[in-house]
Amino acid sequence: MLYWRGVNSQCYGNDAVTAYHLAEATACLTVARSARSGRWGEALDARRAHHPNTIRFDRPTRTQPVSLTGTQCALDCAHCGGHYLEHMRPIWEVSPREHASSYLISGGCDAHGRVPVTSHLEQVARLHPGRRLNWHVGMVDEADMAAIAPLVDVISFDIVGDAETAREVYGLDADLDDYMETLALLERYAPVVPHLTLGLFGGQIRAERQALSALAAHGVERLILLVLIPTEGTRYAECAPPPLDQVAEVLLDARLMLPSAKLYLGCMRPFGAYRQALDELAVRAGANVIVNPCRAAQTTAEELGLEILWGDECCGLD
């Protein structure tokens, strides 16, 4: 399922690795701050060459996350376990008279990794007039995609870099080719913004670069990067987040492999010292948008001479 980390939602971390991440963050930031050449310099040069001298910080207070399944999900994924569905409102409790300007339409998956997108279509249709809808559909088939297309403004779609990760995390028999084929199918009906979670395989950087290569070859124009949060009550609760130096390298890979694509650091990422360092590293690696940024991101953007813009909806609704 798609994660939603609203500004008021409960945050989980892993206290056992706090000291390690403090030391790791210091070392990583020292390199990034002092770099004027090498990959850090190349990343900023790529950003300047292909993008305006602005950065957007989003606090998505005007987007309401909605679940089509309530708290039900057949997959019980290793990183989620249905926890994030608890932070979404069931579709049957949502009224079109509310003041949200947009909705994230999501929910739990069936055993094949598909959100039941054609359920509750009448209720969703009542929410659409005057509002934008960002759908999370999972591994949807073409018939269901065609059925919901008139109600779709954008689709958020998770990319997984290899079959072992899909099997370990989701329990699905799917590989990178399957995800890229589904991406191509979705693009025939609506704009799609791919999501890639770094460290999804129990906090290990594993097949993220393969996914980036495939997305670069596909010519994606936008990419939202997330980072695993070890979440209480899930199978990955005791895992550490991926090492910051490795995450930084993937951020640099993303900018250099996708120089003209708009890169986002999305709402799902660890908190505390890890997040402070990650947000600064993302700015220095050339990110275009950061959701719920730490103060460090703002300070770094100002240092780099970037004009700061602010948004108040889900970053996928660009």
Image (spheres, helix red, strand yellow):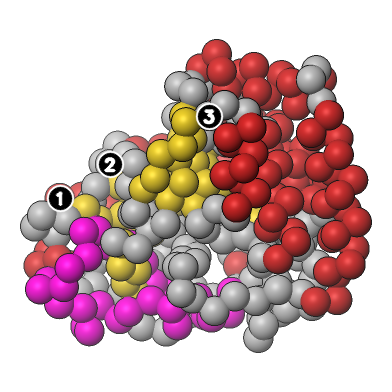
- For discs 3 and 2, the disc positioned in front in the rendered view: 3
Of the residues under marks 1 and 3, which one precedes in the sequence? Answer: 1
Q: Is residue 68 above or below residue 222?
A: below
Determine which quarter of the picture holds residue 91.
bottom left
Q: Is residue 95 magenta?
A: yes
Q: Is residue 242 above or below residue 220?
A: below
Residue occupied by mark 1 = 150
- Rendered location of residue 71, percent (x, y): 42, 84
- Rendered location of residue 12, percent (x, y): 65, 76
Give the left or right position of residue 271, taking residue 143 as reference. right
- Along the line of sight, which residue is nearer the eye, 269 or 104? 269
Q: Is residue 175 above or below residue 86?
A: above
What separation in Å lies between label 1 and label 3 (alpha carbons)? 37 Å
- On residue 190, the disc is 2
Q: Are marks 1 and 3 in contact (CB under 8 Å)?
A: no
Say what amino acid the circle numbered 1 marks: Pro
What separation in Å lies between label 1 and label 2 (alpha carbons)? 9 Å
Q: Which residue is at a point 43% across and 50% down the rendered structure image? A: 58
Of the residues under marks 1 and 2, which one precedes in the sequence? Answer: 1
Say what amino acid the circle numbered 2 marks: Ala
Q: Which residue is at a point 43% across and 78% down the rendered structure image? A: 87
- On residue 306, the disc is 3
- Along the line of sight, which residue is nearer the eye, 190 or 24? 24
Say what amino acid the circle numbered 3 marks: Leu
- For discs 1 and 3, the disc positioned in front in the rendered view: 3
Give the left or right position of residue 39, taking residue 165 as reference. right
Q: Is residue 17 magenta?
A: no
**Part of the protein shown in magenta:** 80-108
